[in-house]
């Protein structure tokens, strides 16, 4: 066996893991905090990609500025959705799943009506287009950008949730909503803000995926199941999603090295089902997480 | 109970009228394409029924019903494909194109029509029994089970695309001629095909209805209400959940067989996440607590899609999505609950002596 | 003679906290045993351990000479243990009648129940229990709309429908009126002819009236066991429990 190419596979695995993780980040926040299963998450990603496309195409915004801008735009969409629909469904988890699927249909078709079904492309700065050598592995510079941004976001979220007052409030609401309310924490506001935050993160992911792949109204669908599995395997916590994405990303890459991409994906789906059979609460179950 | 909606005799009568209406269709319609289309609605009705049974009555949201439907459909397509192969030419053309020079083991049982058809129904049913058994024993439930079915569905979807020499890959299977059964050729555009689907839909509905009215049905409704409590009454919750999930899968597998008989075609699209979710939408809009409501939900949505879809092609998904959101938000028990509250109002007007308190937002899902 | 229910050296830890610590007790067939103790003494946890809701860290539970330690909930229920929960757990979306019907769990096999449409003996039993629980007029109402007292009665009715050999009642009279408490005491005393009862209760007046035997728990361990007179005379019990009650 060729050790060098296996090493390449491992390096590529880190990149795959970062892609899976950034797709799952927003979902982790939303599910972990409010217990909402947001089926429109893939479409939030898609909206992020289209936001970047619009800003770039119509306003000529540089790509790196599109990232925070997409965050803001999709976060606002998420905010509107939470206020208009989700907040009425917090005590009906299966219904949020269904309602958000309805939202995903509307968003997908709405974008198709406005932008058409033909693919759009995002332009990136010259320096991201080259390839970089990592040991013997050649990897596109943009994938390293994705990795960097993912790492930055994870760190920022960790700071937000564990080092700020907002984070303390979020965790208080997660543990016990009634108790938190008696300390004057407005759980409705916390849910609203985490939902917007989660949506914004999907927006950033979309701005990145728009470069890795083409921008299409249907692009979200391919990410949503995967993102869900990362969240469920991780148990809904930030650390859980990081580990779950890391392990599955590597497995995907290594299995694909021995077989092919599609078959590797099949094996991972089956392994995840087997894993959850024995640990239905996921890797790091949070105390008080809603089931 | 004062409400006619919960009257068992009235329910059976409604079912009888509904199916009688469908029985006269072939006698009045001589457009064979329309007949074929109506028969495919019957297949969708079966799928909505299976979702209603599992989700409405068992409380198990299954987002992967496409597995049972798709596997059943593939089994049937394999059987029909092998009917057109013979001794001199035993290997389907797509395999030859994928440079497969012998018939794979997986395909050999399908050389016999009867074995093939039995397998087409038995394999997905067995899968449901095993998968459901494992999951429910581990007490995976609610949204988690839904996600698991989604994962399993995606797994099947990818493996079917990946194993092109055995499954036809993305192109799927297109058996060149219609089903031969016991010496007859079942023309998909004939009334015979319609009757076959009608018969299965009727049978499945009657069986499902009987299940919900049996002691089994009572226990599953109790499990849907509070599975934890039911355990302390001595019932094995996992056992009941596995049985209802498997019966639901069996109905979907039969629907898959009927579907291929009608359209002579199967592809991974039948295992697409979107299609399985549409089944849930049918049941949700029609009313998941009502078997008949769910079937009608499938007819309404698919009918609207065929007829409005041509005019509003671009906005159809927009309309469907919006409608679905409104139903989930404001009418969680679907259109059937409108009928229920309508009859409830009627009963309340007629007899003030009725002991039932009205204006209770959550109806008793007695059906 | 061995007891119907025997608990030997039962322990249960959650993380590092020992909730039940080397607890043993025995319940004689045909008697009514009251399990008392201050809040957090481990009474409900003991019920959870007996009925299989949680698994013990160590120790053994024997019911009718059969080891039921760490068995599944439904297996223990089938062996003949019925339980009423502290927070009344009824099937809120179903009618009172359906609640009682489900609780009449003679046949638990899912396959047999697929073909069962009429359950023999159900109607008679249901009428009897509904009358006893005073729910005859409410049979067609949804259980979720019952008052707290009625919900208590419904759950007691459900446990009686099961016809268990051992009934575990967790705070059965909470939320009941004076008259209803008297009625409950009467019913419980009657039940001793056919069944064995373990009742968790705070109301010492009620305990005094019904108990054949009293078991006092404190911090997960057995503090004292005996008749109500013995318990009330026990100085240790006075210190940890009765004293607290009287002070309150």
Image (tube, helix red, strand yellow):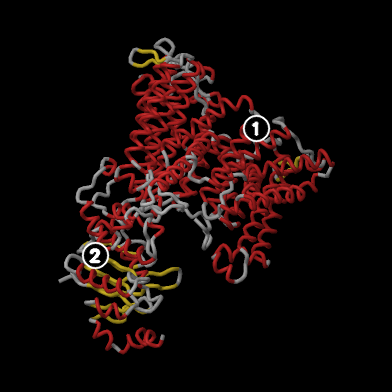
Q: Looking at the rendering, in which quadrant would you find the N terminus of chain C?
A: bottom left
Q: Nearer the viewer, residue C193 or B30?
A: B30
Q: Nearer the viewer, residue A157 or B38?
A: B38
The mark found on residue B350 in the picture is: none
Residue B208 coordinates in the image, percent (x, y): 36, 37
Task: Judge the density around disc 1: few (<14), some (14-19), many (≥20) Cα neighbours within 10 Å.
Answer: some
The mark found on residue C166 in the picture is: 2
Residue A152 coordinates in the image, percent (x, y): 71, 55
Nearer mark to the viewer, of 1 and 2? 1
Q: Quadrant of residue C113?
A: top left
| Label pair 1/2, CB-CB below 8 angstroms | no
Q: Nearer the viewer, residue C128 or A67?
A: C128
Q: Nearer the viewer, residue B303 or C23?
A: B303
Residue drawn at x 47%, y 19% is B36
Please name the residue that numbered disc 1 is placed on: B315
Q: Quadrant of residue A106?
A: top right
Residue C128 coordinates in the image, percent (x, y): 22, 58
Residue C173 coordinates in the image, percent (x, y): 33, 71
* SS for callout 2: strand
Q: Say left or right for A16 vs B360.
A: right
Q: Say left or right for A283 vs B5.
A: right
Q: Is residue A50 above or below residue C21?
A: above
Spatial CA distance of label 1 from label 2 is 63 Å
User: Can residue B55 be spotted in the picture?
Assistant: no
User: Can residue B245 be spotted in the picture?
Assistant: yes
Task: Judge the density around disc 2: few (<14), some (14-19), many (≥20) Cα neighbours within 10 Å.
Answer: many
Q: How many badges with numbers are in the image?
A: 2
**Subunit of label 2:** C
Q: Is residue B199 above or below residue C17?
A: above
């Amino acid at each position: 066996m060729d050790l060098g190419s296996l090493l390449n596979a491992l390096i590529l695995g880190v990149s795959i893991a970062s892609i899976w993780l950034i797709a799952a980040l927003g979902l982790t926040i939303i599910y972990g905090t409010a217990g909402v299963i947001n089926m429109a998450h893939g479409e939030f990603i898609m909206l992020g990609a289209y936001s970047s496309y619009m800003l770039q195409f119509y306003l000529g915004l540089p790509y790196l500025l599109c990232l925070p801008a997409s965050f803001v735009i999709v976060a606002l969409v998420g905010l509107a959705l939470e206020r208009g629909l989700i907040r009425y469904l917090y005590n009906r988890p299966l219904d949020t799943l269904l309602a958000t699927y309805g939202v995903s249909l509307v968003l997908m078709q709405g974008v198709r009506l406005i932008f058409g079904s033909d693919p759009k492309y995002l332009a990136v700065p010259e320096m991201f287009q080259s390839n970089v050598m990592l040991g013997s592995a050649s990897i596109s510079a943009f994938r390293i950008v994705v990795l960097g941004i993912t790492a930055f976001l994870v760190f920022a979220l960790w700071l937000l949730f564990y080092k700020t007052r907002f984070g303390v409030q979020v965790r208080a609401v997660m543990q016990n909503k009634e108790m938190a309310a008696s300390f004057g924490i407005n759980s409705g506001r916390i849910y609203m803000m985490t939902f917007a935050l989660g949506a914004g993160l999907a927006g950033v992911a979309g701005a990145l995926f728009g470069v890795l792949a083409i921008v299409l109204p249907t692009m979200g669908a391919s990410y949503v199941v995967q993102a869900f599995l990362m969240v469920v395997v991780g148990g809904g916590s930030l650390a859980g999603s990081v580990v779950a994405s890391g392990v599955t990303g590597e497995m995907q890459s290594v299995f694909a090295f021995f077989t092919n991409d599609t078959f590797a994906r099949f094996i991972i789906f089956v392994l995840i089902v087997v894993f959850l059979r024995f640990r239905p609460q996921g890797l790091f179950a949070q105390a008080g997480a809603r089931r | 109970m004062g409400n006619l909606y919960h009257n068992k005799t009235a329910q059976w009568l409604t079912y009888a009228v509904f199916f009688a209406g469908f029985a006269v269709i072939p006698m009045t319609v001589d457009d064979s394409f329309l007949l074929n289309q109506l028969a495919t609605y019957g297949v969708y009705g079966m799928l909505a029924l299976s979702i209603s049974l599992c989700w409405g009555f068992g409380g198990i949201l299954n987002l992967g019903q496409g597995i049972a439907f798709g596997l059943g459909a593939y089994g049937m397509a394999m059987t029909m494909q092998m009917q057109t192969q013979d001794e001199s030419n035993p290997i389907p053309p797509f395999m030859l194109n994928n440079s497969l020079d012998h018939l794979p083991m997986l395909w050999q049982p399908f050389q016999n029509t009867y074995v093939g058809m039995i397998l087409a129904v038995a394999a997905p049913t067995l899968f449901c029994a095993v998968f459901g058994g494992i999951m429910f024993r581990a007490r995976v439930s609610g949204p988690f089970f839904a996600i698991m079915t989604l994962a399993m569905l995606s797994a099947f979807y990818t493996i079917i695309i990946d194993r092109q020499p055995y499954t036809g890959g993305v192109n799927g299977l297109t058996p060149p001629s219609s089903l031969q059964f016991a010496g007859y050729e079942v023309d998909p555009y004939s009334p015979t095909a319609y009757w076959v689907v009608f018969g299965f839909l009727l049978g499945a509905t009657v069986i499902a209805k009987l299940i919900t009215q049996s002691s089994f049905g009572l226990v599953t409704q109790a499990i849907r209400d509070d599975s934890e409590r039911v355990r302390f009454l001595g019932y094995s919750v996992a056992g009941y959940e596995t049985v209802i999930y498997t019966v639901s899968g069996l109905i979907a597998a039969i629907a898959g067989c009927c579907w291929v008989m009608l359209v002579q075609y199967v592809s991974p699209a039948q295992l697409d996440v979107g299609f399985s979710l549409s089944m849930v939408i049918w049941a949700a809009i029609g009313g998941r607590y009502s078997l008949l409501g769910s079937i009608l939900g499938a007819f309404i949505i698919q009918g609207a899609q065929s007829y409005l879809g041509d005019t509003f092609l671009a906005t159809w998904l927009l309309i469907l999505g919006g409608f679905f959101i409104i139903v989930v938000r404001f009418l969680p028990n679907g259109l059937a609950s409108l009928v229920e509250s309508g009859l409830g109002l009627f009963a309340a007007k007629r007899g003030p002596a009725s002991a039932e308190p009205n204006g209770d937002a959550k109806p008793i899902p007695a059906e | 003679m061995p007891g119907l229910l025997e608990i030997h050296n039962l322990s249960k830890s959650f993380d590092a906290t020992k909730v039940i610590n080397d607890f043993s007790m025995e319940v004689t067939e045909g008697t009514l045993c009251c399990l008392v103790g201050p809040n957090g003494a481990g009474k409900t946890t003991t019920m959870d351990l007996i009925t299989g809701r949680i698994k013990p860290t160590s120790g053994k539970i024997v019911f009718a000479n059969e080891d039921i330690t760490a068995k599944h909930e439904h297996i223990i229920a089938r062996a003949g243990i019925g339980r009423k929960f502290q927070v009344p757990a009824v099937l809120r979306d179903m009618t009172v009648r359906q609640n009682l019907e489900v609780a009449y769990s003679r046949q638990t096999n899912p396959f047999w129940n697929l073909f069962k449409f009429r359950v023999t003996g159900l109607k008679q039993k249901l009428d009897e229990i509904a009358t006893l629980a005073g729910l005859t007029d409410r049979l067609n109402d949804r259980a979720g709309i019952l008052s707290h007292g009625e919900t208590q009665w419904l759950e007691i009715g459900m446990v009686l429908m099961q016809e268990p050999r051992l009934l575990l009642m967790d705070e059965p009279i909470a939320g009941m009126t004076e008259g209803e408490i008297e009625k409950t005491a009467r019913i419980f005393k009657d039940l001793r002819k056919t069944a064995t009862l373990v009742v968790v209760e705070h109301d010492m007046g009620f305990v005094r009236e019904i108990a054949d035997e009293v078991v006092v728990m404190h911090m997960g361990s057995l503090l004292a066991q005996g008749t109500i007179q013995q318990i009330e005379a026990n100085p240790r019990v006075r210190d940890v429990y009765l004293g607290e009650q009287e002070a309150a």
